[in-house]
Amino acid sequence: MKLTYFLISSVVLLGTLNSCSDVLDVAPDGTLTMEEVYADPDKVGALLNACYNNIPQKGYAYWFFDPLLTACTDEGWSSEEVQGTSIQAMYNANESASSHPIRDMHDGHGAANSAYWTRYWQQIRLCNQFLENIGTAAVNSETERARFTAEAHVMRAFFYSELVKWFGKVPIVDKTVAFDADFSTLRRETVYDVVKFIVEDCDAGLNSTELPWRITTEDEAMRATKALAWAIKSKMMLFAASPLFNEGEDHWEEAYQMNKQAVEELKENGYELFSTCTNPSTFGTYGAAAFHQLVCQNADYSAGPRDKETIWQHRAGGVFVWHVGYIGSSMDGTYKCGTCPTQELVDAFETADGQPILDLSKPYLDDKHLQPNYNPANKLYDPKNPYKNRDPRLTATVLCNGDSLIWNNGEVFTVETYVDGRHGISLDPSDRAHSRTGYYHRKLVTPQASNTNPINNSNWKFFRLGEIILNYAEAAAESGHIAEAKAAVDEIRARVNMPALPAGLSKDEMILRVRNERRVELAWEEVRYFDLRRWQKPDGNLNATCRWLTGMRITKNNDGSFNYQRYNISSNPRGGYQNRDLLLPLPLDEVSRLESTTGVSWQNQGW
């Protein structure tokens, strides 16, 4: 079953060709037949390039330089909550099928971070058309034809994977169709069936001898690889098996087998965790120095790269996060603090002995998260000195009271988030300069970045081996392969000198530990937003995680000691936690047209 007119504009192709006008030589009247395009190897290459359009930049490239998806989870709270942005609309639950603050956000930065439904179907149509014609197109060599074909398959898989993440069930479209075709039998397919189609596309790329495992030159940055194909397969099979999408069927064993093979294939072909800090003068020598360097640096392109963990990163440059998402304008030269970590995120980091601070099965005794349910087996955590003896990834991810900060001209500051401290909290929702939570973001900021040393954050990393290993761990735990799940998690923890998980964990206990490891390792990487949703059943919601969020109010005593008190950041529940928020709504005008044509419901639940 096919989909064209009701999903994308009839001028999509024209718009795409116009966007490539610097590459394509068009006739004086602006027209160019497809026969002419496919008869010219340069134009064929330009059409393949068009298949890479509309790849979102993510991270801090959303409107007004705020990490939107992080700010819409229990990881962070944005200082933009009253500034008329998408964040304000989400926090106030001002969302509808006709206008949704995530789906339809302002895209003033040109980062393709909006209009997902339209953009991704546009790209799928371009890939379909390319695949239909590349077999007879003029190319420079048969090697080039084979590689181009493989790339188009992998890119179609990528855009389908993005549709599934945001919208769930979608139609399967594998070729272009005339605009006057009969669409009355068009239907949304199950996520499992869509994922199987995605896997087929990835396999088409993997079966090509011309698709490389790694990009080795800057000129080819962001081109598809076999590693990307495996990463897409890994993530999508995890989604298909998850409660939100599995429709009561058990696909965990299949997800386990696919993810196990993904990790094996990636490692056999040169991918490995970045485990040794190569720049200790900047990142230090503590346990998470290599971890922090990995997420702050761009992957390098060579046959023997320094970073062998990153699988696919955007080619567009990063954003000046030190200016818009770091310590805030309490420091010279910064504009705002942006999204700040919550107490919930800080609670997720274990103590250095490997014990969770809270009971992972029920972390809080009350709905508002003001009463932590401490793990009785943890003897190291001290609520009166809460940041001591913690997983070193806490230091790499969050700026806490008492941490050191290097600023302009190398001057070292002590972070003061206590009341009346230099970086103290503010309960004023219009204050962009100071944290609402008692913490500031650090993970994506290179140490020593400042007004006098303006270092942008790295290009967005879509996939890295660390996530694929944790995908494998989750699928292994869910399918009952407990020893393999433990080994995978232990590999991630070893990089930061955290102890291995204890032996003898039950299946349920292992699932909780894997989920928490994902939360810690992948914080601020836009993974938590989708994890929280796919772990819910179709009738579930985000009440327990995203409705009430807390910060830490710290006061300083005369003797230099501190008092710590949890508090709710807002007196009202934050929006975005309802059942309908598990998926984005399809655009209302599209739904109206599709339902009138097919006679069946198209909208996601609750919209």
Image: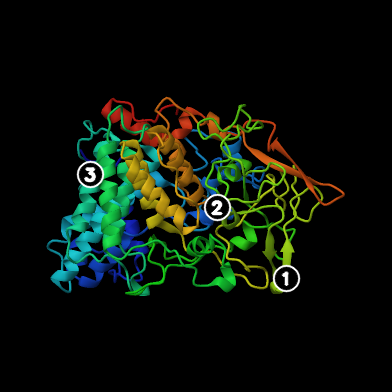
Characterize the local packing of mark 2: few (<14), some (14-19) or many (20 or more) Cα atoms within 10 angstroms: many
Image quadrant where residue 7 sits:
top left
The amino acid type of the residue labelled 2 equals Trp
Mark 2 lies on residue: 63
Give the camera-side residue of 156 and 445.
Answer: 445
Q: Quadrant of the C terminus?
A: top left
Q: Is residue 136 visible?
A: yes
- The answer to whether the residue labelled 3 contacts the one labelled 1, judged by CB atoms less than 8 Å apart, is no
Characterize the local packing of mark 3: few (<14), some (14-19) or many (20 or more) Cα atoms within 10 angstroms: some
Decide which of tag 2 and tag 1 comes sooner along the chain.
Answer: 2
Give the camera-side residue of 95 and 555.
Answer: 555
The amino acid type of the residue labelled 1 equals Glu
Q: Quadrant of the N terminus?
A: top left
Between marks 2 and 3 in the image, the one whose residue lies nearer the viewer:
3
Tell me the element at label 3: helix
Characterize the local packing of mark 1: few (<14), some (14-19) or many (20 or more) Cα atoms within 10 angstroms: few
Image location of residue 152, percent across then percent down: 25, 58
Image location of residue 354, percent across then percent down: 52, 47
